[in-house]
Image: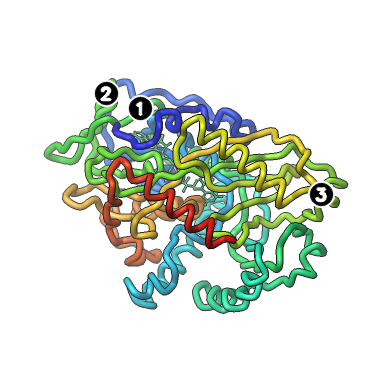
Amino acid sequence: MKRIFEDIAYTGAPVQNCFWNVTAPSREFQTLGADQSCDVAIVGAGFTGISAAYHLAKNGVSVILLDAETPLFGATGRNGGFCCLGGSKASDAGLDRLFGKNERLLFRQAEKEAVGLVRGLLETNAIDADTHSSGETQLAHRPKDSAEMAETKATILQNYGVEATYHPKEELMQLGLGGPFFGALTTPLGFALNPRKYATGLLEAAIENGVKVYAHSPVIKIERNPRGYDLRTPVSTLRAEKIIIATNGYSSEDLPDWMRSRFMPVQSSIILTRPLKEDELNAQGWTSDQMAYDTRKLLHYFRLLPDRRFLFGMRGGLFATQGERKMIEREIRANFNAMFPAWSGVEIEHEWYGLLCLNRSKTPYVGAIPDMPGAFAGFGYHGNGVGMGSYAGALLADLARGLVPERPYPQAMRTVPKRFPLGPYRRHLMRPLYQWMAWQDR
Ligand SMILES: Cc1cc2nc3c(=O)[nH]c(=O)nc-3n(C[C@H](O)[C@H](O)[C@H](O)COP(=O)(O)OP(=O)(O)OC[C@H]3O[C@@H](n4cnc5c(N)ncnc54)[C@H](O)[C@@H]3O)c2cc1C
């Protein structure tokens, strides 16, 4: 497995103090000890792989799901739990230019359906994932961003067919959204959840439908055989007619070779306070259950959990070195203190980070791997994989069954992303981009 981040990024160290682990401990899974075979083998047990496994098994397909570590080890078990619109960094104008307006609207429809899919999976499988928040609220960090929200409101109506609500600055305290904000826009789509409870519940449902799951079984080689593929792990071989690669930010350059330079892993970081008392919440003026984020390009995302802990996230370091880690630890605290000064003395009890994935196309890829018949991949959700990863999994299940998906499957998700330049050194491309974004955010 050739991976481009420092080794520590692929160990348990970044999630040693992840809060979700405490709320939904993982059960034990065996390693793939003896050779086995199945219809569809899935590499990577996160939202994408679990959703694909669930949707395949529901339709009678025999599935084996492998993870190099444990299920939910990747971003799935450690994200912010915003089940929201997104999955792409492409602008409307960019999508229109490349695919036309109808395809842009189809992509927006897919984003919306991704949120609905998660809602449906929670309900159908009676998964209690501590959900809260009525849609998502974007907070203007400058007056000019607030002024632009009228235009954004119109765009939201066109793209998603829903009326967003604008809240002027004067109303924010009353709404429990107290902070250095100049206005807000609430889009009534999406909700927040405990990502580990959701993914664990879906994994259990997949297992009930017959999916076999193996942990500590890294696929180290993919070979063709006359009827499909042999996935080699250090101790055994899994033979399958079809395979799905669902490794996202934890992907390797050589599994398969086609993945080389086709994805950009980047880090995101989260801190979590102890439960806040009512007088502390009132002192800051933040009492809302809304999941929220600011208008910065290098955005901050935050929400008050049902147990009144406050979750605050932002980008992570470009490298997983100790020096860069220390810098991000300082920066995330400084940003949190600046935005929520009343809580600057409050204990941070949990802190963790992980890898998400960007594509050069700025849109997710969900589809066949060219020149590998019967092989499929889904990756590149641009930090919005709770909904979009689950949705990609459902699409991949259809594709692996040889079906044309009935759900929206826009051109933007079917177009193979080009490789990033600079090969294994491509993370260096992000430094000037982050600097440009920070400059834009002033
Ligand atoms: C800190 C953070 C906060 C985030 N917040 C949000 C949020 O609030 N909302 C949102 O929508 N998205 C968020 N995201 C993004 C979201 O978590 C991801 O997009 C999503 O989890 C991707 O799911 P996945 O199943 O595709 O990949 P992952 O969950 O990353 O899983 C990939 C799996 O593949 C396994 N693997 C890799 N290589 C191999 C191999 N060779 N053999 C076997 N297994 C292998 C890994 O061990 C891993 O478990 C966040 C991400 C991070 C890191």
| Residue at x 49% of width, y 39% of height | 354
Q: Which residue is mark 1?
A: 217
Residue at horizontal 61 percent and vertical 48 percent from the top: 193
In the rendered image, the vertical position of residue 14 relative to residue 187, given as above or below: above
User: In this rendering, is residue 428 above or below 235?
Assistant: below
Quadrant (top left/top right/bottom left/bottom right) for the C terminus: bottom right
Q: Could you tell me residue 311's position as x and y percent?
A: 66, 45
Residue name at image x 30 percent, y 61 percent: 414
Earlier-in-chain disc, 1 versus 3: 1
Disc 3 residue type?
Leu
Q: Secondary structure at mark 3?
A: helix
Mark number, residue 109: none
Q: Is mark 3 within 8 Å of ligand 1?
A: no
Q: Residue 367, can we see it? A: yes
Which disc number belongs to residue 236? 2
Find residue 324 and report its horizontal and vertical position in percent. Answer: 51, 36
Q: Earlier in the sequence, mark 1 or mark 2?
A: 1
Q: Position of residue 268 (x, y in %)?
A: 52, 44
Foreground: disc 3 or disc 2: 3
Q: Quadrant of ligand 1?
A: top left
Amino acid type at image mark 2? Ser
Mark 3 or mark 2: name the one nearer the start of the chain. 2
Q: Secondary structure at mark 1?
A: loop
Ligand 1: does it lie within 8 Å of the C-beta at label 1? yes
**Residue contact at pointers 3 and 2, CB within 8 angstroms:** no
For mark 3, what is the residue? 281
Residue 140 sits in quarter: bottom right
In space, the residues marked 1 and 2 are separated at their CA atoms by 9 Å
